[in-house]
C-alpha cells in the first residue's frame, strides 16, 4: 500500500471515528449536546465518502499489482 493511501485511510477513519469522540467529550464537558448532534452528519458523510474512495483506490492498486 502506498503512503498516500495509508494517509487517506487514516484520515478517513479519524474523521469517521475520532471527530464524534472528540465532540462527545466536548458535549460531556459543556453539557450542551448540540455540539455532538451537529457534528455527526458531517463526520459520517465525510468519513464514509473518504473511506469508500480510499478502499477503491487500494483495491485497484492491488489488482494492478497482481497483473
Image: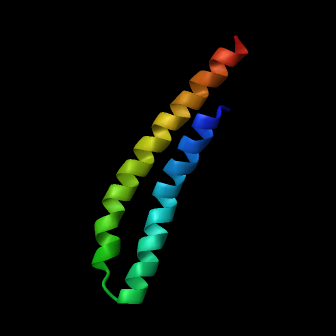
Q: In this view, does 44 lie above or below 36?
A: above
In the picture provided, is 18 more to the left or to the right than 39? right
* Chosen colour scheme: rainbow
**Where does residue 2 sit, x and y in percent of width and height?**
65, 32
> Which residue is located at x 64 percent, y 19 percent?
63
Q: How many numbered callouts?
A: 0
Quadrant placement of the C terminus:
top right
Q: Tell me the residue at 30%/84% (across/down).
A: 32
Q: Is residue 51 above or below residue 21?
A: above
* Residue 6 in picture, x, y percent from top left: 62, 41
Give the quadrant of the N terminus: top right
Q: In this view, does 20 lie to the left or right of 42?
A: right
**Which residue appears at 64% of the width and 36% of the height?**
3
| Image location of residue 41, percent across then percent down | 32, 59
Looking at the picture, how far across and down is residue 23, in whole percent?
41, 73
Q: Which residue is at the far top?
A: 67
Q: In this view, does 41 lie above or below 55?
A: below
Q: Which residue is drawn at 47% across and 56% down?
A: 16
Residue extending farthest front: 3
Determine whether, in the image, residue 11 is placed left or right of residue 33. right
In the rendered view, tell whether residue 34 sits above or below residue 18. Answer: below
Amino acid at each position: 500500500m502506498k503512503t498516500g493511501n495509508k494517509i487517506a485511510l487514516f484520515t478517513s477513519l479519524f474523521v469517521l471515528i475520532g471527530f464524534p469522540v472528540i465532540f462527545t467529550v466536548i458535549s460531556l464537558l459543556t453539557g450542551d449536546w448540540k455540539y455532538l448532534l451537529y457534528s455527526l452528519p458531517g463526520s459520517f458523510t465525510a468519513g464514509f465518502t473518504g473511506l469508500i474512495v480510499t478502499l477503491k483506490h487500494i483495491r485497484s492498486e492491488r489488482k494492478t499489482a497482481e497483473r
